Amino acid sequence: MKPKETIRLGVVIGSAVFLAVFACSLVLGFQLKERLGGSLRSELRRDLLLNSQMLQEKPVIRNDFHSLQSMAERIGRALDIRATIIDIRGNLLGDSSLPYEKLRMAENHLGRPEVQQALKSGFGEDSRFSRTTGMKMLYMAVPLGSPQPYAVLRFAKTLYDFGIFGSGVENDLEKLLPLMLVLSMLAGIAIAHGVSMPLKRLSRIAEKRTRGDMSGEVPSKSNELTASIARALSVMSDEIRSRRWSGEWYQAAFSGIREAVIVTDADGDIILVNPAASRIFHIEGAMLKSRPLSSLADRTLRELLEKVHRERATLLKEEIPLVTGKGARIMQVSTMPIIRDETFEGIVFVLNDITKLRTLERMRRDFVSSVSHELRTPLSSIRGYTETLLEGAIDDKEHAVRFLQIILRESEQLTALVNDVLDLSKIESGRIEYHFTAVDLGETVRKSLVMLRQQIDEKGIRLEVMMPDELPKVLGDPAYLEIAVRNILDNAVKYVDLHDGRIRVRAFLCGENVHLEVQDNGIGISQQDLGRIFERFYRVDKARSRQSGGTGLGLSIVKHIMLAHRGNVEVRSRLNQGSVFSLILPVASDKA
């Protein structure tokens, strides 16, 4: 609670205290006036009765007007009142407020209410304005004489005497009002400060809780005013800690799940998405944030969620194609409705990206199919020629030698195929340990050409090699780099025409990489085949490849070797105009 608020509360409390004290003062003053008035009336009546008894015990001479006047004056002076003696006809016999000479001229008092009451009931009282004294007076009268009264004794006292105390009280209250107001304000501020201190502590703790700061303990010793608030704040703090821990646990658990998890509520709105779902489907916002299904970009996914939510269906590993930020994917969808106390509260969707798994399965099927096909052709040829020899052709020396040469060539093809499959398997599995060092690319090219010299000479290929002497060394494994270079050169030799083939090999530095280009004037590659030539067992010209002993795995091996060398392989080609294969390798550092 801020100081201004404390002062404002103190002013309110002080005002309430002031009004309460002021009201009590007014009530007390009124009660004092009433009691004083009653006391004065009782005293006046007592004096009246006492003097009437004294007059009755010592009778005066009824016709001695001087004595009656003198007696009225003595009583009036002694009691500070107006004393009047009136005969039963209403004439004044004596009056302390009038001189003796004016008694005869005074107005007849027989009609006065107090006189009439005194003659009838033995006591009379009345309050009225006196024309004789010019003031408002309280009159009390009793009869004199028994059993037949001969006169009436009347006392009168001005009502000013009754109001003077009340006026004094009112004057005192007016003087005390500023002091009462100041004291009330100070008391109110003191009370407000005492009340606000524990409230301030509770307020500071509550503000820390709203910011997620759980430090500090709720005061256990509080007054009755703040005890319930402190208990509620303590319970709330424990609940926040529990929910915060649960929320952090859930977030950590959901964040660690690689499957996409989407949770909807009973209205069909998304209330939870884990990071995997946000990343795959580009769902913006926090994990625990409500958003409509329309926020999903993929129409197929949106329609699936709407359908499942509408039918409250349970799916188990149903596969659907979706378009995500990574392109077309195959998702395995499982759903589980949330039912609590027989009330539907939403659905949990779990989507697992099985695109890679299905791709691997397809590749495995293709691989098995391709290997089976590649094995079937040479095995069929070997079996056929073997059966022919066994059926008698072995005795025909000319045909037998030719058949055996074909069988040898097909077995060599099988051996090359098996070796390539094993090499590719080791390269793809990452079981090969590469030994990177600085490699002279020119020397690697010369070694590869030496191994292919016989095929080059047999086909009459014109070979042009341009390897600059200043070409920097590249970073690579010498053995596997030689395999990649030899496969590229072997591929060029196979696909050029007999006696009309041309192959040009050149290398040059481009930035931080060395480019090795192998250009031929062979059959070329069509645009539709360019994207697949690095696939396993893919051949542009299957007949020519088998005739030349190709396995269909050479370029795939080259691609994996270049990726392991943090390089790349590129191809440019036009059908019937030749091809250019480029090996791109990083330059070796001085420390390599």
Image (tube, rainbow, N blue to C red):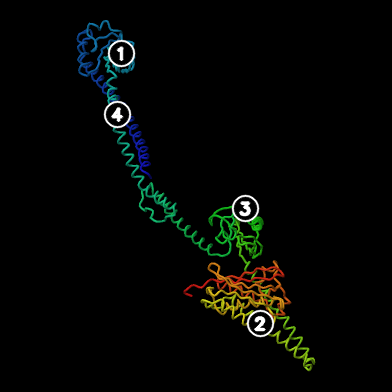
Whole-percent x and y of residue 152?
A: 28, 13
Give the mark nearest the N terminus, 4 or 1: 1
Residue tagged 1: 130
Q: Residue at x 59, y 55 (%)?
A: 270
Whole-percent x and y of residue 106?
A: 28, 7
For the residue marked with disc 4, what is the amino acid?
Leu
Q: In front of the other: label 2 or label 4?
A: 2
Label 1, label 2: how far apart the Cα atoms are: 150 Å
Position of residue 219 in the picture relative to residue 263 (left or right): left
State which quarter of the image contains the N terminus. top left
Label 2, label 3: how far apart the Cα atoms are: 57 Å
Residue tagged 4: 173
For the residue marked with disc 2, what is the amino acid?
Ala
Residue tagged 2: 416
For the residue marked with disc 1, what is the amino acid?
Ser
Give the mark nearest the N terminus, 2 or 3: 3
Q: Is 262 above or below relative to 510? A: above
Q: In front of the other: label 1 or label 3?
A: 3
Residue toward you, 185 or 419? 419
Whole-percent x and y of residue 497?
A: 72, 76
Label 3, label 4: how far apart the Cα atoms are: 75 Å
For the residue marked with disc 3, what is the amino acid?
Ser
Instruction: Name the disc covering residue 294, or none.
Output: 3
Residue toward you, 172 or 80? 172
Give the mark nearest the N terminus, 3 or 4: 4
Instruction: Name the disc covering residue 309, or none.
Output: none
Please tell me how crowded label 3 is: few (under 14), some (14-19), or many (20+) other residues with Cα within 10 Å: few
Q: Are marks 4 and 1 in contact (CB under 8 Å)?
A: no
